[in-house]
Amino acid sequence: MDGFVGRLRELALLDGMLARVARGGRAGRPGRALLMRGRRRVGKSRLVEEFVERAGVPHLFFTASAQPTVTADLALFVSAAAGSALPGADLFAAQSPRTWDAALALLAAALPADRPSVVVLDELPYLIATDPGFEGTLQKVFDRELSRRPVLLICIGSDLAMMEALNDYGRPFHQRATEMVVPPLSPHEVGEMLGLPPAEAFDAYLVSGGLPLILDEWLPGATLHDYLAEAVTDPTSALLVSGERALAAEFPAQSQAGVVLRAIGSGERTFSSIARAAGGMPQASLTRALRLLGDKRIVDVALPLSTRPSRETRYLVSDPYLRFWLSFLGPHLPEIERGRGDLTLARIRSSWTSWRGRAIEPVVRESLRRLPSGHLPPETAVVGGYWTRTNDPEIDLVGADRTPVAKRITFVGSVKWLENGPFDDHDLGRLLMHRAQLPGADERTPLVAVSRSGVAVDGVAVLTPADLLTAWPD
């Protein structure tokens, strides 16, 4: 498989921004800035590397590495700039700037004035963490120097909340930069890359999360179990190391947020059950950890969707790959490293069907939210689920006009994701019973079945894996 796949939309957006730099700007300010964010290991850096290689313009690509001091970061920056393709790179060979103000001013002098160039600051949150004043310094140098030159400044970060906040009102870079989100590859793109039919494409998405590094190791046409047989027994596979590296970058192993995340990843969904799994963590500490995980967009915080308010909050790991890694791989890395990946593989195979049945639900909901109009009943603006404290009932799919408290329920649905188990009379009877228990629904509320193996009854709208893939265009 080629080392770079997909991302046509993102490459086109980057090409467009560079073209605007080349055309110049108002009042002699052709320079532009871009704030790029996306989850760790999603391929942001690789995307930008591919972009600058294709663009063929002078560029500097600097990656911060969480150095303990500003001086250490500056030394790495100067070294990268001196070895870059910028026409004034030699300026850095004889200089040792001691502040970011001086280093960035020197960068401006090294940029070409007669043709466009690209400057990439990767892992920007690391620079801000080491030097809280870096954000203001970058804004000042951009306004005074960089914006006057034909340069595209690309700042990349994996801390989603921090990168989003950089462009907020009151922050130094407010309204100075365009924002760009690099998502994982979609289920549709995963299927296209691997040559898999729709249902198997979703299986591959549940395991890989759409991360290019993992998919690059997956041979086209290989089944899920073929891939896992290779990856789970190889301690160096991207499937194993990506989760470990992502968590190590965000949370030390014994941090409270890391402990809580692992508890949620093990399958705990409620505040009380997470507290128990986290070793009886005090309520205040657990609340802080959950808030941090929510702010970082690592954990989704959900409420039941109906016409009645509810406090029955549930927590779910946002990233499909990380859900799989925390469930099956992370807890068993020691046995894999000592050559017993076969035990981990057997555990996955024995639990796969039941685990997949629950793991597919948030992916189905997101697919339904993205479906073009006409696939779901009119007025459907949100798709969620419904549950009570006792899980009686627990409804997979609820469509409504708004959230968290709906005015109108537009449909009630069920997800059945078995290879050889179509949605049948038993499933319909259970769905009818649950509809009667849902606040805001009645016998006129439409029924929807999302089934991997089709539907064997009448009176319910049917959506198949192929239908869901249409929600994820190229």
Image (cartoon, rainbow, N blue to C red):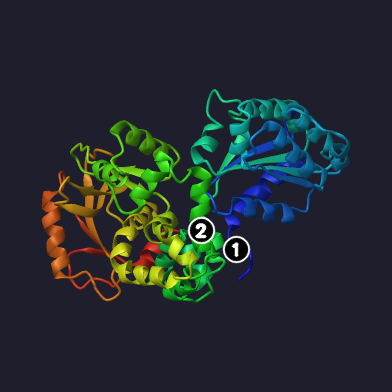
Q: Are marks 2 and 1 in contact (CB under 8 Å)?
A: yes
Residue 342: give its label: none
SS under mark 1:
loop
Q: Picture coordinates of residue 67 (x, y %)?
A: 65, 38
Location of residue 65 with respect to 173 vertically, above or below:
below
Q: Could you tell me how far apart the alpha carbons at marks 2 and 1 are, in whole angstroms? A: 9 Å
Tell me the residue at 66%/51% (across/down): 48
Tell me the residue at 58%/57% (across/down): 7
Q: Picture coordinates of residue 19 (x, y %)?
A: 72, 46
SS under mark 2:
loop
> What amino acid type should be assigned to the residue bearing mark 1?
Val
> Which image quadrant is residue 107 in?
top right
Describe residue 192's horizontal placement relative to residue 325 as left or right: right
Location of residue 318 with respect to 271 vertically, above or below:
below
Q: 208 and 421: which one is in front?
A: 208
Q: Which residue is mark 1?
A: 5
The N terminus - image quarter: bottom right
> Which image quadrant is residue 278 in?
top left
Q: 451 and 46: which one is in front?
A: 46
> What amino acid type should be assigned to the residue bearing mark 2?
Leu
Tell me the residue at 46%/63% (across/down): 188
Q: Which residue is mark 2?
A: 185
